[in-house]
Amino acid sequence: MQQYHKITSADLDFFIQTCGKEFVFSEESSLADYAKDHTEDLIFYPEVVVKPANDIEISKLMAYCNQQLIPVTPRGAGTGLSGGALPIHGGLVIALERLNKILEVDEQNFQAIVEPGVINEAFQQTVIEKGLFYPPDPASKGSCFLGGNLAHSSGGPRALKYGTTRDYVLNMEIVLPNGSIIQTGANTLKYSTGYNLTHLMIGSEGTLAIITKIWLKLISYPTQNLLLLASFESATKACEAIAGIFKAGNNPSVCEFVEPAGFELSSKLLNIPFDMHPEIGAYLLIEVDGNNLELLFNECEQINTTLEQFGVKDVLFAQTAEEKNHFWRLRRSIGEATKFNNVYKEEDTVVPRASLPILFKEVKDIGKKYGFRTICYGHAGDGNLHVNILKDQLSEEFWNHELDKAITEIFECCKRLGGTISGEHGIGYVQKKFMPIVMPEIQLDLMRKIKQAFDPNGILNPGKIW
């Protein structure tokens, strides 16, 4: 294992000289917010946090830390769920919150240039005002940074129709661990010029380089959308209905699966009403979008016909923008509500869409076998099921030492069904021990060699992925 150096007063002087005293923090009270993210209750304190203003300052910091063997953890908004921003080796945290500018929106080429600290929703609203659309919309879109979205190839509900973050990145400027600044590709829709470093960087979780500028692809904004909430007595039937919707020729922009307990927790957290019926086993939140309202109503009718074939109990149609916002607030708050009410672990499973009913059943069977409850929800239209395992009254011994056996069985099911262990949350710190379940050693070794090529001293976000 690499032996890292503790930060000295001389190092601190260099950081201050580079970024300014007001942007360098070493007191414990100032470090607390950077010792955790949204992953469980894990805490790892950095030794120092710096907030650089631009790529030049980041370049100087990286070159220095590489020479001094100081571990560096890049950090966005800290909304991650796999521990990717946790400074588990202490060292330096480079917080990117000051790189928060939308540099350009090119309406002619349907492109934008942004810095990594731009908040996802703020960027979405900016381009919508120009009739353009950036679809990736994670649940934390109101606070997460675009740089962190790239680091994890984030998705969100509308990935079903529009794809994930990966599908909207044309090029980026990055700072390598040795301080070199390069661009990874070109600002073009096509790229066939050597290895695609842009796609290599997306999903690399801050282990290869630090992103300092991003060129994003945009599309036209769909001006109309309709939202349905369908309830089922059987969760399995709800899962089966999803494949049925697509087999019937429909193309919804959203198809979310939610267990009733998820909506119940959100309703309590937000203190907003939601009618709970004991006979309901699952809900599907379905959206269609486009520019022709008549066509969208026809599509909703076709979807309703399909849902009836799978025993739908009721279908609610959101009549107003307020009703749509009501349902979306409930859906997007489930993760936060679960954490507020219980100690939990969230697994980000993903399988081919048609295999979702099998995955859901096996998750519930494994829970019964090991004696724990789960609340499941997620982007069921693309096979991405978030499995929240609740601690309830489970012993510390089981939670800390035995639960991994159950999680391993869930992941082995994903592998058997042709899926994998993370669809959008990444591997980070907490999932790395499960990587051999889905990847043979030769594949893991190739990834380690890529890491070695970018970061031979192993200083950048060490202890993540493997």
Image (cartoon, grey):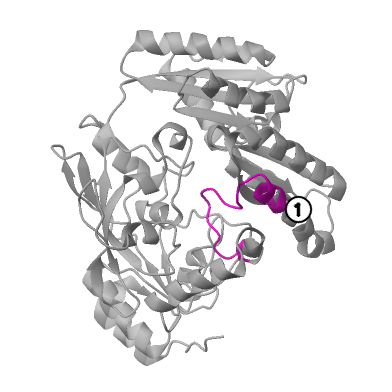
Residue 160 spot, x, y in % from top left: 47, 34
For residue 33: magenta? no
Residue 328 visible in the current orientation:
yes
Residue at image point 73% right, 19% down: 277
124 sits left or right of 208 in the view:
left
Residue at image point 26% right, 43% down: 217
User: Which of these two is toward me, 101 or 416?
Assistant: 416
**Vertical order, 456 against 43 (above or below):** below
Residue 321 spot, x, y in % from top left: 41, 19
The part of the chain drawn in magenta is 411-432
User: Which of these two is toward me, 195 or 422?
Assistant: 195
Q: Which residue is mark 1?
A: 409
Q: Report the magenta stretch's main SS.
A: loop
**In what quadrant of the picture does the C terminus appear?**
bottom right
Residue at image point 65% right, 36% down: 355
| Quarter of the image where one finds residue 305 | top right
**Vertical order, 354 against 117 (above or below):** above
**Vertical order, 49 against 226 (above or below):** below
Residue 90 spot, x, y in % from top left: 51, 78
Label 1 sits on a secondary structure element that is: helix
Residue 323 spot, x, y in % from top left: 48, 18
Residue at image point 75% right, 60% down: 404
For residue 423: magenta? yes
